[in-house]
Amino acid sequence: MSDGPDSGRPAFTLVEVPQAPEAPAQDDVAALFSAPVQDGTRRKGDIFRPGPGPMVEFRGVTKTYQGNSRGLDGVSLRIGTGEFVFLVGPSGSGKSTFVRLIIRELRPTEGSVIVGGRDLAELRRGKVPYLRRAIGCVFQDFRLLPDRTAAENVAYALQVTGHKKAEVRRRVPEILSLVGLDGKYDRLPRELSGGEQQRVSIARALVNHPRLLIADEPTGNLDPETSLGIMDLLLRINRTGTTVLVATHDRHTVDRMQMRVIALQEGRVVRDEESSGYHDRTGEVPA
Amino acid sequence: MRIGMFFREALRSIRANAAISVAATVTALIAVFILGAFIPSFMYVRSAVDSQKAKVDVDVYIADTASVAQVNSLRDKLNGLRTDGTVAEVTYVSKEDALRIMRERLRDPSVLDELPSNPLPAKFNVRPTDAENADVIVAAVKDDPALDPTEGIVYPESTADRLLTAAKFVQWAGFALIGILLLAAVLLIGNTIRLSIFARRREVEVMRLVGATNWFIRWPFMIEGVICGLVGAVVAVGMLWGIKVGVVDAWAAGADSALTKTGSAAGTIAFPMLTLVLVGAGALLGAIGSGITLRRFLKV
């Protein structure tokens, strides 16, 4: 992107402190997501089936890796449209398997994974890119393209979906400004701090207005304060109607947010509670 | 807009992986250079053999005692072969013509004046459409009553056979070599592109993650391959041009008069045509090389 930091920048910035729950509905995030995402309308190239059903549904999903190690073991659950869900559990409990099944990087050994009303087993290989466009993904290691600036990284996700140049030029600064990266559009990933890189990665995940945002350990490499800012951003995105799934073992964040928590242990769901913390209410570490 | 973007992506990738791009380009250069040196040589040898083949004539001598009817029947036989395609041309050379030709060839034609009569027989000079047909012609007329008993039928049998063997060998060896060269070039370029992709495996992963279709990922790599192939081909053509002007043309100028004297009509591919073929081959090598390699990377 050749845009200077001054062109087309919206006049709002992200406030770093966590917002009160009764934050005004006309949040800047909401302002950007002009298209309502829950009204059942379909966007161009959208492969999700409109309907009131859950965003993600696992039906008896087992994933066995080579050598018989289990990633997931008979998991059945639903994540409703518009929910904010934490997926918690120690390393190796199956969180990453869960995430990779949703974006169809993996296919289940048994059972079915249904995303946006589509059974992923029936999704042709050529359609997988369209599934991924409808899902925003954020990873612990950011997964940015190292030889591209922040703006170019975000622009790439738009170019992939065939957006016009003018559209790219308008939306990229908007979204970067939204995640709090004003004035850093032309920095390469290595010139940004971890938190800033994660913001770029979130901006990239958001720029296509996904129905579902998946974050796999988004704060794993970040200090607590930065983590707070990132989580706040995710929460505000959720308020626009985007379903958000965060896989994490960052207990402070989970405890603070008091959202639905799904706890995995050795590939099984050991706990699934609304408005909960990292540990269950008895204060016990999930066995 | 799409094409422009793919092009920019390709150029970006070439710059970011300069060493690998140079390797691919040099690979293409070597392949195209060898191809470019080989094609004209092959064509020259083939055309030389062909022009020799065209000179395999069959002379059917006619007995002085043959009647007009017999000669006409022989002529009809030969013309019959022409209509079925084995013979290209039948020329009657009368006794007088034969003598005149002999006179022209001799350094001192006055010896012929001593002859009491014309000893040379008349003949049909038969030019087959293909040297291979000489045997058919011989078989068709070898028992004809009009044949001169002493001269009979004369044709350079062993020369014809050897030429035919050589021609076939040159042809098959040539095709086989070109095939092997092209295959080697495709694999080499593919391998180089694979390095380039391997160096950016994570990048491809990210592209897939944000929902890039396989073609969207593939195009820049293909264009990258084509650019490397084209640049390599152009440099190779430049080198070949230098060699042609500096070495081959000089040599041919010296050899030219000798060649024309022996009546060799051997030619080879024109340089502009060769350039076109080679540049096309370079581009194709790049595209196919990267295309094949990408197939393996984009599965899942």
Image (cartoon, rainbow, N blue to C red):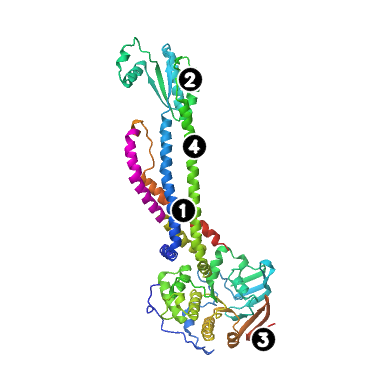
Q: Which residues are magenta?
A: B231-258
CA separation, marks 2 and 1? Answer: 53 Å
Quarter of the picture containing the N terminus of chain B is bottom left
Residue A234 in the figure: left or right of residue B23:
right
Badges 4 and 3, same chain = no
Mark 4 or 3: in front is: 4
Residue located beneath label 4 in the image: B169
**In the rendered view, would you say B53 is above or below B247?**
above
Asked if badges 1 and 4 are on one and the same chain, I answer: yes
Dot 3 corresponds to which residue? Answer: A280
Q: Chain of mark 1?
A: B
Q: Check contact, mark 1 vs mark 4: CB within 8 A.
A: no
Q: Residue at x 68, y 76 (%)?
A: A266
The image quarter in which residue A110 lies: bottom right
Q: Position of residue A131 (x, y in %)?
A: 55, 69
Q: Which residue is mark 2?
A: B141
The picture places residue A214, in percent across and down from the top left corner, at: 56, 76
Q: Which mark is residue B285?
A: 1
Residue A10 placement (x, y as % from top left) = 41, 81
The chain that hosts pointer 3 is: A
Read off the chain for label 2. B
